[in-house]
Amino acid sequence: MLNQFSRRRFLQGSGASAISAVFWGGSFPAPAFAQQRNPNEKLNVALIGIANRGGAQVSGAAGENIIALCDVDDNYLNRVGERFPSATRFSDFREMYDKLDGKIDAVLVSTADHTHAVASVWGMRKGIHCYCEKPLAHTVHEVRVMTNLAKEKKLFTQMGTQIHAENNYRRVVELIQAGAIGPVEEVHTWCGTKWGNKIWPTEFPEIPKNLHWDLWLGPVPPRPYHPTYFSGNWRSYWAFGNGTLGDMACHHVDLPYWALDLKYPTSVEASSPFPVHPECTPIDMTVKYEFPARNDKPAVKLTWYDGDVKPKLLKEKGLPEWGAGNLFVGKDGMLMADYGRHLLFPEEKFADYKRPAESIPNSIGHYAEWFQAIKTGQGPTTCDFSYSGPLAEAVLLGTVSYRLGQKLQWDAESFQAINCSEAEKLLKKEYPDNWKLV
């Protein structure tokens, strides 16, 4: 097993367990080294997963000092390596952390879901600031570990919900929080993406010479290689992903989370009309969430739909049937929004509506704000793990409910489904010794 931590780093990081306490959010003081950094200084950055979705992270970090590139596909690694010739190339991020111990300031993780947590946590334990793609991790437990570890280590973090940085979401949040449609007790969120219902592979070709299959599997028990797991299709298999819900809900549910100040749900109930192989994720999935009242805000029922399923309310109210979006149902009206537009209904009622003054500053960029926070010691970022962790937990609880075929009564503080002891086996997973999370 590779040496995970130097003695110096271990002593710096020793203290409360990353899973012992629930992180309820809030700001935190910056580490001393972040406070002393020159804002114009470039950070030493490592990238884990540099193809496909990871390509955006390469572009986002290009202005910093990229000292390490890590990917299990030699073709991708060499291609990006030509662009950054001074960066050291690795196939195994464990080796990267070991050989560059003390040299990496920040890491961006863009692997498949099943290796998000271990790739992030191994760096975070060394005091490395972390940017990780959604849905942050593969299991609810992994998300909680990452959330608590970020607090314990006082790290600057960001989940890859890039749309959060765009102006449209800000204007929607301002409208909702200004009371444009009155108190909101009901939200419908939908997305037409269809990951899932894939055929279980039965024939297994040879592993391509450019692919380190064992490293791609990481903590997943060994299985034969098959090309169906690639080109994003890993999202369709529970061993590696979490279907459309895991892929897209963090982007879309982010908006009601932000606008309504949501945190942990109290109940989660998921279903799908189509049976699939037990190893595969479903399409046309519906998840019903219940959130408690928050201060002066009422309890909220939020329903997620993916595939071909959309809220019936769209047809009933004669609303546009966009391919994806959110419908906020308030006491005094409705607001419909997607990534780039939003509408108030009934239209005649809001024809002369005077919008609230813009109060949420526009973002300098999803990557830029994370890098700036690290350099200046001023944070947290808008999607740091104190915010995005509870969001990701709620999303992944939907997959647990679906796989168990049962509504879950969720107690976030005790981290358990109080009505279903069987949930424990899907909330967390076991790791081989050389891939341990904690």
Image (cartoon, rainbow, N blue to C red):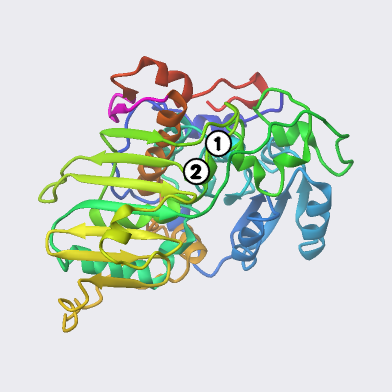
Image position, residue 260 (x, y; %):
24, 54
Please report the residue visible at 79 percent of the width from the left and 58 percent of the height from the top.
81
- Left/right of residue 147 with respect to residue 328 in the rendered view: right
Q: Amino acid at mark 1?
A: Thr
Q: Which residues are magenta?
A: 405-415
From the image, tell me which residue sits under label 1: 281
Q: As rendered, which of 310 and 251 lies closer to the eye?
A: 310
Q: Quadrant of residue 292?
A: top left
What's the mark number on residue 68? none
Characterize the magenta stretch by its predominant secondary structure. loop
Please report the residue visible at 31 percent of the width from the left and 66 percent of the height from the top.
319
Q: Residues within 10 Å of mark 1 (few under 14, many from 20)?
A: many
From the image, tell me which residue sits under label 2: 246
Image marks 1 and 2: residues in contact by CB distance under 8 Å: yes
Q: Amino acid at mark 2?
A: Gly
Q: Residues within 10 Å of mark 2 (few under 14, many from 20)?
A: many
Q: Quadrant of residue 141?
A: top left
